[in-house]
Amino acid sequence: MQKVAILGSTGSIGRNTLDVVDRLSPRFQVVALSGGTNIELLAEQTLRYKPEIISVATESHAKDLKERLASLNCLTSKIYVGMEGMLEVATHPQAEIVVSATVGALGLLPTYKAIELGRRVAIANKEPLVMAGELMQKCARENRAEILPVDSEHNALHQCLRGEKKHEVVRLILTASGGPFRNASKEEMEKATVKEALNHPTWQMGSKITIDSATMMNKGLEVIEAHWLFGFTPEQIDIVIHPQSVVHSMVELVDGSFLAQLGRTDMRLPIQYAMTYPERLVLDLPRLDLPSLQKLEFFAPDRERFPAIDLSYKALQLGGVAPAVLNAANEVAVAAFLAGKIGFMDISKLIAQALLACEKQGVKELNSIEDALNADDWTRVQTSAFITELADLSLTGKY
């Protein structure tokens, strides 16, 4: 029986991970859960899985959780708070697999610490590899840790690359649904509401990830992630729009052959693959019905309407802390859009400003996790100031 710790157990990936645990019982045992702020669901998960430790966001959440667990006669788990709690979950002494499913930069340090301990990390959180991919891979090599991607696109690439020699691969191709604005004009995107941006045509995801899909920043982040996961150059990593979301990614080989991974849009598939690799086990889900597909379409993305793509390539080419700057600026800008403080197209403009500011002062090298965290802090301050400037310009009618 393998012991599992989950960072982000109350999110969609966390919930699907627990479903996989149930389906493969008794192969896995949950020993630690980090649930953030969804106390009601975390209490239910604690009652069901009896983890040794739990992590929540704040002391107030810890108090609420204790009260809920007391009412359920379930007080066997130790409760931790904040980053300390996430680190406790990630480094639980019995955990053999750590599922990293938090959203944003918050998962960087816990994920790194799990890798440092030589664990298998099933990573659904793009941001740690975007912010510090080189350090993550170096740490994994030194500690014989495994980093298995859960993100459907990178999981698909991992499957396509099984058994292939690197010199036989010409390029990696990440597919994208195109999000809710695939066919929208730039003018329509300028006026897009939060509700429209959250109306994803294929996947049910959290709000931040859904907005990243709408701007196509998710694909930009995935390019950076793919670079560090698989060791291919930026020029060897492409993006195509595939509205049907059936082909999750592809690999082109030197002889002109393409390998593609197809499957239903169900995150339990890549989660189980990452947890059980190199085995493939039965997963009792509805199967892909090929005759019903009728057509599979592929289009080049419009980089003018989706500038986040080129910004991501630029950050990767700048190197050092630039990808961490890109990520932090995006997180702040997306939060501002969701809060109604900026327009949809302002998200990419703010990211471009942050990268330019980073470039002007000289892109710092990435020699430690602290360098990534410092760049993250600096960018959040800078981008928040840019947002204030935008608001001032709007009030004076100059924007």
Image (tube, rainbow, N blue to C red):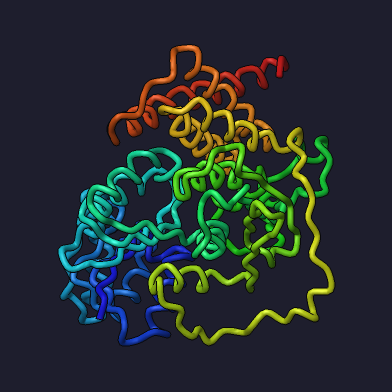
Residue shown at 62% from the left, 34% from the top: 347
Tell me if residue 17 comes above or below residue 384 in the rendering: below
> Is the residue 61 above or below the residue 348 in the image?
below
Where does the image place residue 342, in percent across and percent down from the top left?
63, 33
Q: Is residue 81 visible?
A: no
Q: Decide which of 29, 53 is in the foreground and name it.
A: 29
Quarter of the image where one finds residue 228: top left
Q: Horizontal placement of 232 versus 92: left or right?
A: right
- Give left or right: position of 15 versus 307: left
Q: Residue at x 36, y 46 (%)?
A: 106
Viewed as shown, does residue 366 lie left or right of 341? left
Q: Is residue 371 left or right of residue 380?
A: left
Q: Residue at x 40, y 72 (%)?
A: 278
Give the x, y percent position of residue 268. 50, 73
* Residue 188 in sight in this render: yes
Residue pictured at 60% horizontal, 53% vertical? 210
User: Which one is nearer the viewer's eye here, 284 or 333?
Assistant: 284
